[in-house]
Amino acid sequence: MKTIHLLIKGKVQGVFYRATAKEKASGLKLSGWIKNTRDGHVEAVASGEEDDLQSFIAWCKKGPPGAQVKSVEITETQEKFTEGFLIIRE
């Protein structure tokens, strides 16, 4: 199992990005979390199998209808999540 951190930039708030990302991640059986950042981006951490993570990354680069993703920064992390995919609201 691998874990990645994603920082998604562009028009990604106010377009149901987090909710649809949670649906996608849950469908892929990924665990982790997603949240809005204070500077208008979306941040996520996802754990799962490599193929499923690649599918999630591909989705994140497009996002839901209405999103305009400009970039997705991806780094591997040592954090591990084993249950569920959460939306964090701050």
Image: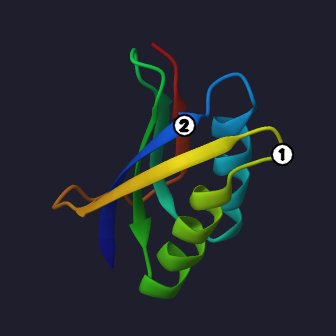
Q: Is residue 76 left or right of residue 68?
A: left
User: Which is more toward the observer, 29 or 75?
Assistant: 75
Circle 2: is it few (<14), some (14-19), or many (20+) Cα within 10 Å?
some
Which quadrant of the view contains residue 24?
bottom right
* Mark 2: secondary structure: strand
**Above or below for 65 versus 53:** above
Tell me the residue at 39%/65% (across/down). Answer: 47
Residue 87: percent from left, percent from top: 56, 33
Read off the residue under disc 1.
Answer: 65
Circle 1: is it few (<14), some (14-19), or many (20+) Cα within 10 Å?
few
Q: Is residue 15 left or right of residue 81?
A: right
Residue 36: percent from left, percent from top: 49, 25
User: Which is more toward the observer, 90 or 13?
Assistant: 13
Tell me the residue at 48%/21% (across/down). Answer: 40
Three-letter residue code for mark 2:
Gly
Determine the residue located farthest toward the right in the rendered image: 65
**Above or below for 46 versus 54:** above
Determine the residue located farthest toward the bottom in the rendered image: 51
| Quadrant in the picture for the C terminus | top left
Read off the residue under disc 2.
Answer: 10
Q: CA distance from mark 2 to mark 1?
A: 13 Å
Residue 71: percent from left, percent from top: 46, 51
Tell me the residue at 51%/87% (across/down). Answer: 51
Residue 48: percent from left, percent from top: 43, 73
